[in-house]
Amino acid sequence: MGTPGHDARNQDELQDLLLDSEGFSDFMLELVLIAAAGLGSGKPVLCSITVEREGFPLTVASSELDAMILDERQYAFDNGPCLTALRQQRTVFIPDLDESRKWEGYARVIASSGVQAILAVPVEAGSSTQAALNCYARDLGMMDAAFVSAVEAFAGSISRILRLALRFHLPALAGADLGPELRARGLVDAAVAVIMARDKCSRAEAFTQLGRSAFTGNMRLGERAIEVLREARRAQGME
């Protein structure tokens, strides 16, 4: 069930949260934990926020590791509910994943997670960036029309502060002081560049290749990226 009282966040409260956070990673983590705690009427909801720039999606924060893994399964195939939500700027609601023919391929991929319902809502993030708030539930019936409305309202309420956070912090995503998720993104970008040079392919093709090899090896994207970089160093006699 949704929580109508949580439909919006006070902008002053969100601004204080941004100002008090030590950096982009900390702020995004606080934001997604607010979402996870305030939605679902006390039942566990996995939440994450995906940001995409120049065709590369990244989970900038997740309430639990499982939410990030569920996101990354979509990135590996360059398709899924959250990517559709942010790229088409529309809500994607799957009340029963087992009964959804459109997403049956993704349902098979994440079957072991126990997730039964998914909601992805776009968050306006500016002209050059796309974002989405993603919710995953393991209990059928948790996500109803009221829940969808509550999440859409929350996504709308965080749009302005998210744009502000991205404007000030996104240029520094490659910095050494960022959290593990964002440092992993730097490794992924470097591995994509290696694959492009090695296979003479486009960035999109290299990213897809990296994602598929990570999935085949049952690895996270960051782990597979490290392997690709090590392989390149060995090929050049540097290890």
Image (spheres, rainbow, N blue to C red):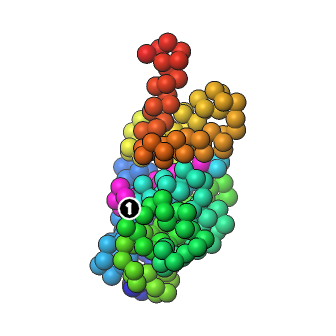
Q: Could you tell me if residue 97 is visible in this image?
A: yes
Say which quadrant the C terminus sits in. Answer: top left
Where residue 207 appears, as percent x and y from the top left, is 60, 42
Q: Pointer 1: residues within 10 angstroms few (<14), some, or many (20+)?
A: few
Residue at horizontal 45 percent and vertical 74 percent from the top: 117
Most common secondary structure along the magenta stretch: strand
Q: Which residues are magenta?
A: 56-66
Vertical placement of residue 32 versus 137, above or below: above
Vertical placement of residue 212 versus 236, above or below: below
Pick out the residue farthest to the top.
237
Q: In the structure shown, which secondary structural element does the residue marked by tag 1 occupy?
A: helix
Residue at horizontal 53 percent and vertical 57 percent from the top: 74
Residue at horizontal 38 percent and vertical 61 percent from the top: 112
Pick out the residue farthest to the left.
42
From the viewer's side, name the closer residue of 232 and 40.
Answer: 232
| 65 is within the stretch colored magenta | yes
Residue at horizontal 49 percent and vertical 73 percent from the top: 97
Residue at the disc numbered 1: 112
Q: Could you tell me if residue 11 is visible in this image?
A: no
From the viewer's side, name the closer residue of 126 and 131.
Answer: 131
Give left or right: position of 84 versus 69.
right
Where residue 128 appears, as percent x and y from the top left, is 66, 54
